[in-house]
Image (spheres, coloured by chain):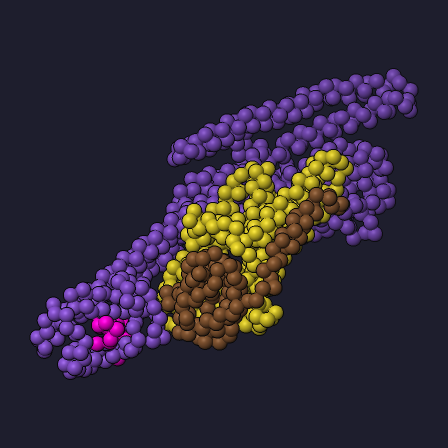
Chain colours: A yellow, B brown, C purple
Amino acid sequence: MLLSSVIIILREVLEAALLFSIFIALSRQLGFDFKWVAWSLFLGLIGAMIYGLNIDAVSQWYDGVGQEVTNALMQLGIYLMLLLYMLLLSITLFSTGRPNSINHKKTLKPALVFIMIIVSTLAITREGAEVILYFFSVTRSENHLVAVLTGMTIGGSIGISIGFLFYYFLSSLNFKWSIIIGLSLMIMVAAAMVSQASLLLIQADWLPSQLPLWDTSGWLSERSAIGQLMYALIGYEATPTAIQAGLYLCGFIVPILLILGLKFKYNLYP
Amino acid sequence: MKIKPFSYFPFFLIAILLCFFQKNVWADTPIIKIEIRNHLFIPSEILIPENTKVKLIINNLDDTDEEFESYELNREKVIIGKRKGIIFIGPLPAGEYPFFGEFFPKTAQGKVIVK
Amino acid sequence: MKSIRTFLIIVILSTVTLMAFLSALNGYQDSMAKAEQLFDSELVDKSHLLLQAFLARTLIDNKIDMTSTQPLNATVSENSASLIKDIELENEQMAAENNFFAFQIWHQGNLLLRSSHAPQKAIAHFEKGFNDSNFLNHRWRTYSYYNNTSNLWILTAERTDIRYVLAENIILDSILPVVIMLPLLGILIWTIVSFGLSPLRKLAKELGNKRVDDLSPLSIDEQPIELIQVVNSTNDLLKRLKSSFLREKRFASDAAHELRTPISAIKIHLHNLAAMVPENEHSFLQLKSSVDRMGHLVEQILNLNRTSPDQYISRFNTIDLYKLAQELIIREYPQFNEKNIQLALEGEPCNIEGDPFALEVLLQNLMTNACKYTPDGGSVIVTISEKQTDIQLQIQDSGPGVPKEQYERVFDRFYRLNGDSHDSGTMGCGLGLAIVQQIVELHQAKITLGHSSFSSGLLVNIIFPKEPSARKQSVSLPEVS
């Protein structure tokens, strides 16, 4: 029970921790305060409780695939929010230091903070609900209590530690590089969201299912620790289908194109 | 902000993909029922034909929730205690695809055998 | 914003946590695999034992020649009924306590013997080796063992969940300390990092506690090598600052001092010249007023330097503030009388600890200001009152007053209200209140400005503490007089 509780908690915590560390590092670079972190934690925990306690009802929606659809919608929501965040951030960065331009840092700050709160809240809601379900299911038998608690502590600590180290890595970089790396990671996390959402929709039979395109599980198994990390970070799948891979690619390319387009526009008309 | 024409490209790609792979959608979907009892999958081995989509109906008879999980099948779904859950799997190439209940992984184990 | 301490604590703790937990998990996995192997080999042993026991009993009972091709099952099924009963009884007791182990002995598709709770159906495949299967509402680890000579299948099974809990409970004991240790480790790392950074904190504190005018070098002893460069650079900077500070000080006071003599000379010459020029000669009057102004400026600069806290060698005595004010009023009365200003002194005698010369300059400056800005026929009130812990000095006039937003600025050196275009046309150099503030600081008093009790005008309120706290040792720069 220990190992599985470690894996379950780690998978959920790691995703949130990575997202948070990127956001916090970027906030720091932009000179925002960290009040939004407390808000997202608070709202996210409330959301997780509500979702976790009502998952029974949610599951019954759409002929028994409500859970998949809800999760997929949350993930698509996160994706769109991240997309918006990246665009606003790019506008902020491209416009600063240019003559005759409004100070976007000030005007766009509320929007950026709002998006961070929404994204973090959604992420915690989805992941926290699963942790809550797991915890209440497993601890019903006394046999596993110690093992599960130990496992949850270990998994949570590992996830948070990685988040911290990641944050300090990002904030040790200079402004330009921390923005570039932060944005790239965000693009990967966002694309991973699309891939996961598409997978859920395939599972719910909302998207057509297909034979997998390839199988890289021999090369990097999704079960392995690195596989889990890659899953959280870039949405690694060993056996994706064409739709999933296509959507992942789109999820990856769209923000890059939009950011490059913005850069192009600002370079043309400064 | 003006959207540049090339940013429509991904949506075209999705549309093309969707049209191309539409053929499987309307095929008859066989149904396979699995029960979860005492943290066991019953039956623990299920046989499905190759390259066919299958609808798994998982009936959790336990009080506790369980999460049907399979890395090989790329599936993950919480089945609430005393409730049923539906998961679509396949089409799949021949082979063995282990699955397990993530909440009680030592006992809740099984595999899908595709022939 | 960045804290070295937080950074060190979090990064070290995170790294240690990561490493400790990952290795603990690794150990857990290895141990669980070992335990699994152990249970498996035990299962194999059990199968062998079962076979031996079964063969021994049947041999003894029936003297069967195992090598014969005669089917075993008939004999066994007829003759070993009692044996089966025995074993089943035993098993039932075992099963009641711990439903952990099950077995079956098969011979050519017939079940010869089984543990009490084993089902009638085969509990495992008739394939040699280990497998997993579900029966009796549990998951079992099964082992199928085939004995060639007796043509028997021994199927043994152990419950996976129980095996797992048994193994995990043992291994948990070795992992729990690592988890419990973590908060302890956190405290330890926190302490160590704090201790390690204490020289830095001490240096920062030493610098923070330094008085503005304390330019003495920091001690270089007891500093760790990492900080020696910092301390050396700081000391170097302090040294340079001190010498330039001294130069500036000396220049101002020397210049003022040196200017006094020529100004006196000019005044004498002006006096002599007065007889030669016609009365009301415009240029002459202008010259006279300018020279007076210059003389005033020089005096004020000297006052400012004399009362500067960083070089003032104070001689504090007990002084009666009321009496001092009285004397000054008598001395300054002519200029008030000239403008027809009513001057009143209220209050009672009260003693304060102070420097007589400085207090005199203070009162003089304030009264001159009041006189300057009060129109003809106005009034000025000086109040001295004793409060519980302090003594209050108030000077009110009926002049135009000072706009609120200027309260801060009027204390700046050379700042004059409304610039140089004073409507009162009075002489001044903008140093008066700067000097006053310096003297107020020297006495650890507080000065505030406000509205006077007249319809317009300024209220200057100074509160002297009765018992000034232990006087900071005024570090004088001895080279400067």
**Residue at the spot x=85%, y=24% of the render?**
C286
Residue at 62% over, 58% down: B22
Check if residue C312 falls in the magenta segment: no
Image vertical order of residue C466 relative to residue C83, above or below: above
Instruction: Give left or right: position of C253 versus A48.
Output: right
Residue C99 appears in the figure: yes
Q: Which residues are magenta?
A: C96-112
Q: Give the left or right position of residue A172, taking residue C87 as reference.
A: right
Name the foreground residue: A143 vs B65.
Answer: B65
Tell me: C186 left or right of C214: left
Q: Residue at x 59, y 53 (%)?
A: A243
The x, y position of residue C342, in whole percent, is 81, 46
Residue at 50%, 27% in the rendered image: C236
Q: Is residue B5 above or below residue A13?
A: above
Q: Quadrant of the C terminus of chain B?
A: bottom left
Q: Position of residue C182 (x, y in %)?
A: 38, 55
Locate residue C336, reporting x and y percent. 80, 40
* C390 displayed left or right of B97: right
Most foreground residue, C390 or A148: A148
